[in-house]
Amino acid sequence: MQPVAALQSEYSLWWRRPEEEVLPTLEELGIGLIPYSPLGKGFLAGTIDASATFGSDDFRSQLPRFTPGALSANQALVELLGSIAADKNATPAQIALAWLLAQRPWIVPIPGTTNPSRLDENFGAVDVELTPDDLREIDTAAAKIAVQGARYPETLERMTGG
């Protein structure tokens, strides 16, 4: 029998529920976390605004967080990342990834992309240094932002543990 080395779960500034029970359990057991969707399906990269539309072949067209109203309400999170990115000479995506990397040394996010320039941008997150003050600022500001829209449609939300 092989011990569990890592768990893959969604985790980002946009969905922090793993902090409640999953992260403490993983830490206790010495298991790593591989967060998928660390950029909130592209939203935290700062390239999607309230006017964005998605074709029927784009999974995001089915997600409550990607409706125009939710996109508009959730822009505050992207604005937070953008303001910190400007101070760090980085991009919002790099700040979102650097935040994840700063949470625990055993967290290794897997941002997905098919765009080589986005891959290079994502790699740049390892060079972004977030100080303890930066992390407190992000956490304090993010706690005041109520993310609008469910992660998935109701039928999928029940299956993924909402």
Image (spheres, grey):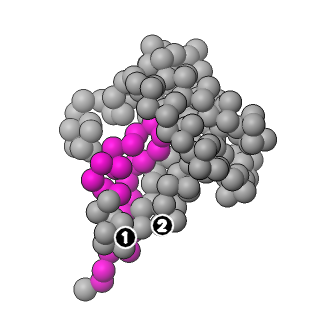
Circle 1 residues within 10 Å: few <14, some 14–19, many ≥20: some
Apparent side of residue 90 relative to residue 63 in the rendered image (left or right): right
Within the image, what quadrant is residue 6 found in? Answer: bottom left
Q: Position of residue 79 (x, y in %)?
A: 62, 26
Q: Secondary structure at mark 2?
A: loop
Determine the residue located farthest toward the front in the rendered image. Answer: 133
Q: Residue at x 69, y 53 (%)?
A: 129
- Percent x, y of residue 110: 53, 56
Label 2 crowd bin: few (<14), some (14–19), many (20+), radius 10 Å: some
* Badge 1 element: loop
Q: Position of residue 99 (x, y in %)?
A: 56, 48
Tell me: residue 28, above or below residue 128: below
Residue 113 shows up from this direction: no
In the picture, measured across the screen, residue 158 lies left or right of residue 120, that is: left
Quadrant that contains the N terminus: bottom left
- Please, what is the three-letter code of the amino acid marked with disc 2? Trp
| Discs 1, 2 touching: Cβ within 8 Å | yes
Q: Which mark is residue 106?
A: 2
Residue 32, by quadrant, is bottom left
Tell which of 51 and 161 is nearer to you.
161
Residue drawn at the location 62% of the way across and 43% of the way down: 134
Amino acid residing under circle 1:
Ile
Report the side of 102 relative to 69 (left or right).
right
Instruction: Residue under label 1, please give it.
Output: 31
Query: What x and y, as percent, mark residue 147?
Result: 41, 26
Q: Horizontally, is 29 left or right of 37 in the view? A: left
Q: Is residue 42 depicted above or below 1 in this figure?
A: above
What residue is at 50 percent from the left and 55 percent from the top?
A: 103
Magenta stretch bounds: 2-23
